[in-house]
Amino acid sequence: MAKKWEGIGKLPAGGFIAVPNHCTEIDPIVVGHLVYNQKRPPHFLAKAGLFKVPVLGSLLRATKQIPVERSTAGANRSLQLAKEVVDAGGAIIIYPEGTLTRDPDLWPMKGHTGAARLALQTGAPVVPMAHWGAQEVFPRYAKRFHVFPRKTVRVLVGEPVDLSSFADRPLDRATLTEATDVIMDAITALLETLRGEKAPAERWDPALHKQSKHGRFVEGAPSETQDPEAGK
């Protein structure tokens, strides 16, 4: 698998929040490799359950990955830990979509507000990223890699997203939703550049298509069985 990285010079010297698109399970390897290669240890927000897995949990804690819980209190703890990493000059990687995109053509879907909330709370720069090609190596929900013929995975890093217009606004749902849309627009624009085509005019919203916003999604399956963790 070949790689092509563009825009690396746009990564800030201090702490920052990276916000990539999410279309296959190996995305964290793609983005984490880029960040680590710049001598910036990547810190991901990972499902809290993974921290309970023997060996893996110890590894996640040792590398200061951040557990994410779905309860309000748990989410607040996660954001506090992420804030500490950013304040210390670290790199946090957040997938605003929360899970692999449900968009049939793998365009970024509607985002969650966690990245925007962290950015507005810390003032840390939000760096949009887009990658394309990893889905050919390991298609969404695939069970094996497709290494031949050799593929190229491209990553494009954009300029930090300008969220200055939200600085003096209350961190309510309206503010966070609007800021998230600005972030998702930046990610989508980068992916349009990589793919050489325009994204749909309207971003995919799982709720409108009766799809779960979390967990695995099997196309054609009843909505209540698409996410084995739905309702927890």
Image: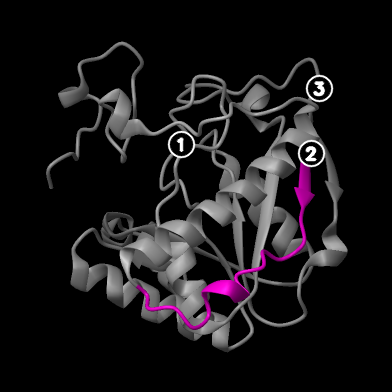
Identify the residue position indicated by label 3 in the image.
150
Q: Secondary structure at mark 2?
A: strand
- Amino acid type, callout 2: Arg
Residue at the limit of the structure toward the top, as seen here: 220
The residue positioned 29% from the left and 33% from the top of the image is: 207
Q: Please say whether residue 216 is visible from this viewpoint.
A: yes
Q: Secondary structure at mark 3?
A: loop
The span shown in magenta is 155-171
Question: Picture coordinates of residue 87 (x, y %)?
Answer: 56, 87
Residue at the limit of the structure toward the bottom, as seen here: 88
Q: Which color scheme is applied?
A: one colour
The residue positioned 49% from the left and 76% from the top of the image is: 120
Identify the residue position indicated by label 2 in the image.
154
The residue positioned 36% from the left and 62% from the top of the image is: 174
Question: Picture coordinates of residue 5 (x, y %)?
Answer: 84, 48
The secondary structure that dominates the magenta segment is loop
Identify the residue position indicated by label 1 in the image.
100
Quarter assignment of residue 169: bottom left
Q: Earlier in the sequence, mark 1 or mark 2?
A: 1
Quadrant into which the N terminus falls: top right
Mark 2 vs mark 3, CA separation in Å: 13 Å
Viewer-nearest residue: 95 or 58? 95
Quarter assignment of residue 215: top left
Apparent side of residue 20 relative to residue 114 in the rendered image (left or right): right
